[in-house]
Amino acid sequence: MFVTAVPAAAFGTNCYVVAIAAGEQCVVIDPGIGVVRGLDQVFAEQRLRPAAVVLTHGHLDHTFSVAPVCGARGITAYIHPDDRELLADPAKGLSLDLRSIVGGALSYAEPEDVAPLVDGATVTLAGLELTVDHAPGHTRGSVLVRTDSDEAPLCFAGDVLFAGSIGRTDLPGGDHAAMLASLRDKVLPLPDETVVLPGHGPLTTIGRERASNPYLLEVRDGVPGHART
């Protein structure tokens, strides 16, 4: 399997390109701000043909380039229905401070073809079987996207789980109680060897987070967490 990260130009967002091998079709996960040139370079170097875009949630730093990536190739964007409105109006997911910073400085367009990611479904795209787990808390429509590789299971976690922390829950649509439930019901049951590819920061594993992430410890043992990004 081929997996690589393309860093966005803002907010430290990780965009991922996933394919069964070089020279095949691929899936783009979370194309954020300023990733189009980097994606085109990966496509050319690895002879990849984008087949779909998958969005772990609807925040602008994960969706900003979805329209140019999809529109240039006539492909579909997939997102959970609870975050669908954020593709039409990303400002609904921003705090007042972020709205004032971003304002009208960024030119955003909604993708033409959007399809739903359904909790528990397995979607086959570019030869990959992607399992969807609805994991609200950071946003109402946040999801984990899981697939298997030859080495270990993979989990594209968006802003649900980071190395050592979790996504913030104080933005519009955020819900800390829902996040803790998602950690308990969707994250903790995953095998320790699962490689977590988060929306921000370095990759990690479920085993590592189970042993040290303060929020997973809170869910597992009832010990309050102390750090959040």
Image (cartoon, rainbow, N blue to C red):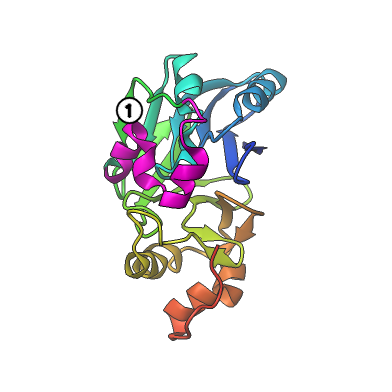
| Residue at left offset 53%, top offset 67% | 228
- Left or right: 101, with 185 as reference point: right
Q: Is residue 35 visible in this depiction of the protein?
A: yes
Determine which quarter of the picture holds residue 59.
Answer: top left
Residue 186, given in percent of the width and then of the height, sits at 39, 62
Q: Which residue is mark 1?
A: 114
Q: Is residue 176 left or right of residue 168?
A: left
Residue 104 pos. (x, y %): 46, 31
* Image position of 27 with respect to 178: above or below: above
Mark 1 secondary-structure assignment: strand
The quadrant of the rendering that contains the C terminus is bottom right
Q: Amino acid at mark 1?
A: Val
Query: What's the magenta region?
Result: 82-107
Looking at the rendered image, the quarter that the N terminus falls into is top right
In the figure, is residue 187 to the left or right of 174? right
Tag 1: Cα neighbours inside 10 Å, few (<14), some, or many (≥20)? some
Residue 225, given in percent of the width and then of the height, sits at 51, 78
Is 207 rendered above or below residue 48?
A: below
Q: Residue at x 62, y 29 (%)?
A: 21
Of 148 and 11, the residue lying toward us = 11
User: Please, what is the dominant secondary structure of the magenta stretch?
Assistant: helix
Give the x, y percent position of residue 7.
65, 39
